[in-house]
Image (cartoon, rainbow, N blue to C red):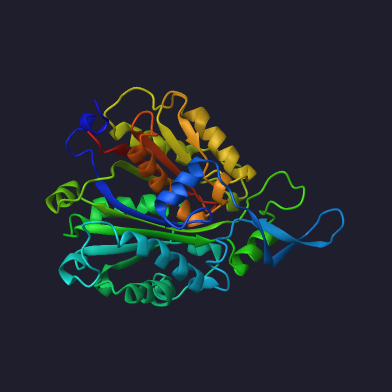
Amino acid sequence: MSASRELRPGDVLGVITATGAVTSVGRGAAASCAAIRAGISRPRRVSHFQVLEPETQVPQPLTAHPIHGYTDGFVGMGRWLRLARGCLGELLEAPGLARPSDARFWGRTALMMVTPSGDDGVFELEGDDGLDGIREGCLRPLRDALGLALPDANVRVVDLGPAGTTAAVQQAASELWPAGFERVLVLAVDSLLDPEALRMLDEEGRLKAGDKPVGLMPGEAGVCFLLEPEGVARQRGAAPLALVTGAATALERHHLYAGQTSQGEGLAACIREVLARGPRPARFDGDLYADLNGEEWRAREWGTALVRLSEALDAPNVHLPCVSVGDIGAASGALGVCLSVHAFSRGHSRTGQALVVSSSPWGTVGCLRLHAAGA
């Protein structure tokens, strides 16, 4: 029996019907996911940022995971816009989707852009919620460049970093479906290779450089997926690629910037919550996509969460995408979703179930649960 047939009515928060991605190992969702599964990695030295070699104090180019030849010369929101256009351009070519100019179709669609946390200080805060700069400088130009018939009111920002994808799915199920929206474009973009982001990471000692055994390798990506209520998708004849059956977010009180060691309480709580929604009382043994990035704080958080989850997890198949693409920040959750969809569609998933686990240095954590849609 397939995983989807075990679900009860009301278990499905939404279905994924299209994906898109641009990463350092692929210019498309399928290419990126296949490369990550194969363990392909393309680290390069970046010319626009140097770090001091600890012993000699001689500046050396930083090794990172740029999308070579694609984001060169772009900075700030211009870089985000470049990544966003790349992945959304792929998604909009999915079979069965209406033309971008179809006002009836896209007028009932929300565009939710997942970005780094405003607390990071990478972008200037403007407007009542601090997000007007992103809407005006990136989201609306993106919509206009793609010719999407989306009203201004349908364009939103979720500035929660890696856990933002989970929060976007929560908002879709709890707010947008009841309000009459028929689909949500979840778009996650981030570049830790932006000069300002690199400067901040270097000042905080978070970069893996020289002979330093821990730290992150910066990456960048644009990843998106289309989420729809199951009935709406089937009514328009769209075949679901995956079912989203759980979404939970929480706050780790002892996060990196609190200067304390994380106890993994929030992360464990999120995973327990999404597993409680599922049809199987047994311990979870499917695929688990984590955004572990080589930093010690993240490893400690995950390790303590695992101790708390000893009765809920049964040796899941853990995947670490950052090994291939580096730390892609706010785009990591959406990439985990795309990797789950790819594994389901190619028959690589051993159980037809997946968890996508996300964690922010500011304490926001999240977990998504997905099921294969095939019979």
| Residue 17 visible to the viewer | yes
On the picture, is 93 further left or further right than 349? left
Tell me which residue sits at (40%, 49%) in the image.
30
Would you place residue 373 above or below residue 203 in this image?
above
Tell me which residue sits at (67%, 54%) in the image.
207
Along the viewing direction, whichever of 75 and 368 lies nearer the viewer: 75
Q: Residue furthest left?
A: 235
Tell me which residue sits at (51%, 69%) in the image.
79
Percent position of residue 275, x then y: 34, 33
Percent position of residue 282, x then y: 34, 22
| Residue 113 visible to the viewer | no
On the picture, is 145 further left or further right than 310? left
Percent position of residue 115, x then y: 45, 62
On the picture, is 20 further left or further right than 300? left
Percent position of residue 1, x then y: 24, 25
Tell me which residue sits at (41%, 27%) in the image.
285
Query: In this figure, what is the number of numbered marks?
Result: 0
Quadrant occupied by the C terminus: top left
Picture quadrant of residue 109: bottom left
Picture quadrant of residue 58: bottom right
